[in-house]
Image: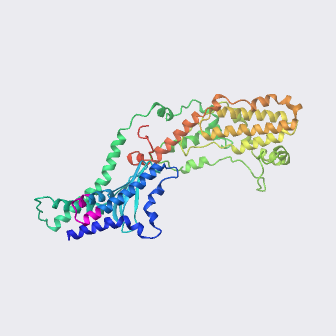
């Protein structure tokens, strides 16, 4: 029986590497692992992969032939061939796979801690030896069939030693019990050892560098709430009886209370949802329910002509949103700006898009009328100067971009106005031109505070969505992130 088992192992080692070539058109299966390389992989890496595959196949065939002929080297070579098939490692840094047709694999996925097994009797051939491959979740597999064959071959090798005397077998129940607890230990080791190694490795983290500490240091708050234009923007749509600063503070406090709760970021509760709904929404429809135009795209049409054509509708919108437009004008006069919320993917964003668009459309309307033009120029200067202050002090990406777009849109208004008045009318536009085309200050050009805030948003998202520890740290790590 033992001799028959060795012959079966020998035949499998001979046949398995040759199976892909037994079917016409399927020989490419032998090189499927090469597809795991991207097109930019160095030729040397491809050659290494091919040499690895050929070497394993040749070794398997030679070991099978030697074992079938009962040569002394057959057992040792066969043990080596089976040992190559025991581990399967998948990770971003290193991947190793040797699978010959059949096997029973116990696996552990370190991203979830899930343990299971799968088996295959045919058509499961894979070879891989990859360093720094595609990002994958770490996974370890153990081929139990290969382990069982190694045990049989080791026993056969031990029996060949001179003077070997085989011990009597214990009773069957005892053998079953021994197999059960040994199998349990193997499964526990499969999960525990990698986790312990990662835990130990994670405990040896180096102290973050000064650059890392600077990027993830909390943002200072220096502007009082009563003077903060960002907070005024956040509460712009408060009811008429409430101060926008007070309403914005309520919105901010509800968000800060939610973000401070331990665990993943939760959805807003009914109280916060009620605050998020604008009590004083921007009116976009007339009394009949039809949409009123309030924005113009200067890339597609002449906005001066558009504003003249829709003058009555713009006047109706201005009357319907009198309080909001008064508040927006007050906002443009505020001199201090600071993003006050804790950076996260759920932070509140002030919304004044409709008011800004209507304000700009009213400027388009009035610059065509010489009588209204001076007031329109003053409003243009007021809006641009606020955008410049906003761009110099904003730290959020949204507010920074909103500032840049506001300045660009008023540049287009000025360009259209210059075309309309001609060279003779430039004398009355000098002050406006100086403001609208003013060179950005160093603070406006500086994007490091915005990148700092984006880094904090990422840190908050990571802390709230990824459980700290070696499992997720390994899963989301790419290179050198255990040190910095």
| Residue 66 shown in magenta | yes
State the image coordinates of residue 33 (x, y, percent, origin top left).
Answer: 44, 58
Is 287 on the left-hand or right-hand side of 8? right
Residue found 48% across the figure and 57% down from its top: 35
The secondary structure that dominates the magenta segment is helix
Instruction: Return the residue nearer the eye: 381 or 445.
Output: 445
Instruction: Return the residue nearer the eye: 403 or 356.
Output: 403
Q: In which image quadrant can residue 85 be found?
A: bottom left
Q: Which residues are the magenta region?
A: 63-76
State the image coordinates of residue 59 (x, y, percent, origin top left).
Answer: 32, 59
The reply to whether residue 342 is visible in this rendering is no
Is 89 on the left-hand or right-hand side of 418? left
State the image coordinates of residue 377 (x, y, percent, origin top left).
Answer: 80, 34
Instruction: Return the residue nearer the eye: 416 or 190.
Output: 190
Considering the image in quadrants, where does the C terminus appear? top left
Residue found 26% across the figure and 66% down from its top: 68
Image position of 59 with respect to 259: above or below: below
Image position of 445 with respect to 290: above or below: above
State the image coordinates of residue 81 (x, y, percent, origin top left).
Answer: 30, 59
Q: In which image quadrant can residue 225 be found?
A: top right
Residue found 72% across the figure and 43% down from its top: 355
| Residue 378 shown in magenta | no
The reply to whether residue 412 is visible in this rendering is yes
């Amino acid at each position: 029986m033992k001799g028959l088992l060795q012959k079966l192992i020998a035949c499998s080692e001979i046949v398995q590497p040759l199976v892909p070539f037994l079917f016409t058109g399927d020989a490419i299966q032998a090189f499927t692992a090469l597809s795991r390389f991207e097109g930019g992989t160095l030729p040397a890496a491809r050659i290494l992969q091919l040499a690895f595959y050929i070497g394993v196949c040749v070794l398997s065939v030679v070991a099978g032939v030697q074992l079938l002929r009962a040569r002394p080297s057959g057992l040792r070579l066969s043990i080596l061939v089976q040992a190559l098939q025991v581990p399967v490692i998948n990770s971003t840094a290193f991947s190793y796979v040797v699978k010959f047709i059949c096997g029973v694999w116990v696996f552990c996925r370190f991203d979830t801690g899930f343990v299971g097994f799968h088996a295959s009797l045919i058509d499961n051939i894979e070879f891989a030896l990859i360093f720094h491959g595609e990002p994958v979740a770490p996974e370890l597999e153990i081929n139990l069939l290969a382990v069982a064959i190694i045990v049989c071959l080791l026993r056969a090798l031990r029996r060949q030693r001179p003077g070997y005397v085989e011990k009597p077998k214990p009773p069957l129940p005892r053998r079953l019990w021994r197999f059960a607890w040994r199998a349990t230990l193997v499964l526990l080791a499969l999960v525990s050892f990698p986790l312990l190694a990662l835990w130990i490795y994670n405990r040896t983290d180096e102290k973050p560098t000064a650059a890392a500490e600077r990027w993830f240091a909390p943002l200072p708050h220096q502007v009082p709430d009563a003077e903060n234009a960002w907070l005024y923007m956040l509460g712009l749509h408060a009811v008429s009886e409430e101060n926008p600063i007070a309403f914005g503070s309520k919105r901010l406090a509800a968000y800060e209370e939610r973000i401070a709760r331990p665990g993943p970021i939760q959805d807003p509760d009914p109280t916060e949802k009620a605050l998020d709904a604008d009590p004083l929404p921007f009116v976009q429809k007339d009394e009949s329910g039809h949409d009123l135009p309030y924005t113009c795209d200067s890339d597609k049409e002449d906005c001066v002509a558009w504003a003249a054509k829709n003058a009555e509708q713009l006047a109706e919108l201005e009357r319907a949103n009198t309080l909001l437009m008064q508040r927006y004008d007050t906002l443009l006069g505020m001199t201090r700006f600071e993003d006050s919320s804790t950076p996260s993917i759920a932070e509140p964003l002030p919304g004044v898009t409709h008011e800004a668009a209507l304000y700009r459309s009213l400027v388009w309307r009035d610059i065509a009328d010489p009588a209204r033009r001076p007031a329109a120029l003053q409003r243009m200067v007021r809006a641009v100067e606020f955008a410049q202050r906003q761009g110099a002090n904003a730290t959020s990406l949204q507010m920074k971009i909103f500032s840049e777009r506001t300045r660009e849109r008023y540049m287009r208004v000025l360009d259209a106005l210059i075309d309309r008045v001609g060279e003779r009318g430039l004398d009355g536009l000098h002050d406006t031109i100086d403001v609208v085309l003013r060179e950005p200050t160093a603070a406006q050009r500086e994007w490091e505070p915005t990148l700092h805030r984006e880094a904090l948003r990422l840190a908050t998202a990571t802390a709230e969505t990824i459980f700290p520890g070696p499992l997720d740290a390994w899963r989301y790590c790419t290179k050198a992130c255990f040190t910095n």
